[in-house]
Amino acid sequence: MSRFTADVIVIGSGAGGAAVAGELGRRGMTVKVLEAGSIATTAAGTHSRNERPMDASMPEAVEYLSRNYVAFNGDAQAQSGLPGLGAIRAVGGLFTAWSNNAPTHDVSELPEWLDLAEWNPLVARAQRLLHVSQEVPDSDPRSESLRDGFRRAVGSLPEGREVQNMPIAAVWDGKQLHFSGADDLLVGAGAAVEIVTNRIVRRIVTDGDRAVAVEAYASATNEVETFSADHIVVATGTVGSAQLVAASRLDAGEALGAYLTEHVIFGSRISLKPEFRVDHEVDGPTFALWAPASAAHPWQTQLTRHILGYTDELPPNVDPRNTADILGLCPIEPRPENRLRFDFQHLDDRGLPTADGSISFSRRDREIAARALGEQFLVADELGELEWGWGSSLVPRGGTTHLMGSCRMGPSDDGTSVVSPTGRLWQYTNIHVAGNAVLGAANAGNPTLTAVAHALHAADAIAGVGTEFITAAAPISTSGK
């Protein structure tokens, strides 16, 4: 059995794992990132659209997803409760195909115990690493007129949370667009971070309250390898992280896999009215607009051109460049009965217990979704041609790629959380979880920026800087500011 050592072992190379690894590498710690897949993009962990990032590349982006997005359990067993559940097994994972929408969550979408004085600097750090800007969509000449129409349809919203440009994690230099990905989070880490591909971690080995190593299956050699480190970070997605904790028989309490949440996402595609069209190809980034969530408007509505079309009720021969997608993202309350289930009698194609689960809607969830769907129709009617019909399609449960909460974060070990506010498993001194798995509050915003900010906080804790808890009371916003 081969043995390797590092200061830190990070399991998974997506947004959470790359954020922790990059930060620790920049601090001079040696990090080995164990990734179950190989490199699927032109550079390790870069966004799949960076080779051809303009509007014309959307068919290639769809092809990348269709080729790499696979059922989570492989061919082992279908997910009946989460039929849309899938994964990209490659360096960067789903982060290689994310929308790059990076909105900031409103106070009403954050845990009540979170101290904004400590939280806001973490968000700012994440924004810098991901190159988040609201200026990118302005290169599309339609942005201003579409924004005005969007505002007419939505009506008045709280100050600071009105219809505005979507914050995009990308850099536009006037000629080329670069979408941010795992490679951006690793900048500056250099040789301190090594990504080891085709390693399937099946067990975290502990001695009392400490992890001492992980065991990884090397698919190329059929060998089991041991990686020892002072700190272990689990960052294999919301389902994968809980799956590995369960497979390792770690003491994570009843909350492991519970309080599972995602977003109710539905979308429609419209043909823009003539006044919002352009008669030439838009060479730069396309429009991306956002009606943010707030306490007064607890859902998010987006207007953009998405690589996936949720509906296609369009006139014949419409130019795809003159279409728009309207997406509604609505919160689902975290409840203990919404949870993952793992079957230890049936293993998936990676040798781990198969995963399934269920998420049901509360009355509040349904009421918010109904209001958001009404707003989507108003936006479609204001901006689009509906003479050919109009429809909206709901994303299947588990298929939003926004699953959250399986290793829920909390201020105390009270049975309703799995990890501390730094992402540390309560019963262990040196095991952390990073990524969407730790997000435990109902929210309606794309989770990547928030997950990266929490991952940076975990990295601070591992490096011995920052605070263990973020526990000062934060009032719930009524204005969204």
Image (cartoon, rainbow, N blue to C red):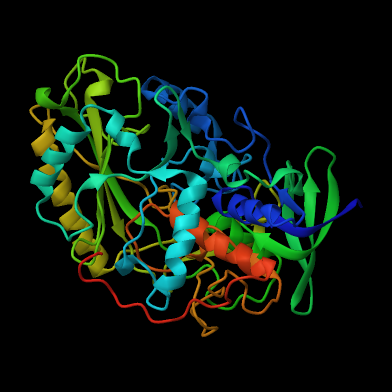
Q: Nearer the viewer, residue 266 or 154?
A: 154
Q: Can residue 39 be seen in this view?
A: yes
Q: In which quarter of the image is residue 74?
A: top right
Which quarter of the figure is the C terminus placed in?
bottom left
Q: Where is residue 261 in the image (x, y as percent from the top left)?
A: 41, 62
Percent x, y of residue 179? 47, 35
The answer to whether residue 210 is above or below residue 271 is below
Please count the marks in the image: 0
Please give the name of the residue rendered at 18% of the width and 50% of the height, measured from the top-left corner. Answer: 373
Residue 110 position, x and y percent, is: 37, 68
Give above or below for 87 relative to 451: above
User: Could one spot residue 357 in this view of the protein?
Assistant: no
| Residue 449 picture location, percent across and down | 45, 53
Q: Quadrant of residue 457?
A: bottom right
Q: Residue furthest right?
A: 1
Is 286 placed left or right of 210 in the picture? left
Q: Which of 261 and 325 is in front in this view?
A: 325
Most distant residue in the bottom direction: 414
Name the residue: 34% across, 62% down: 443
Q: Which of 287 and 197 is in front in this view?
A: 287
Going by the image, does 476 lie left or right of 173? left
Q: In this view, does 41 lie above or below 209?
A: above
Position of 158 compared to 393: left or right? left
- Horizontally, residue 25 falls left or right of residue 40, namely right
What residue is at 19 percent from the left and 25 percent from the top? 314
- Residue at the spot 71% in from the left edge and 50% down from the top edge: 33
Q: Relative to 59, is 460 above or below?
A: below
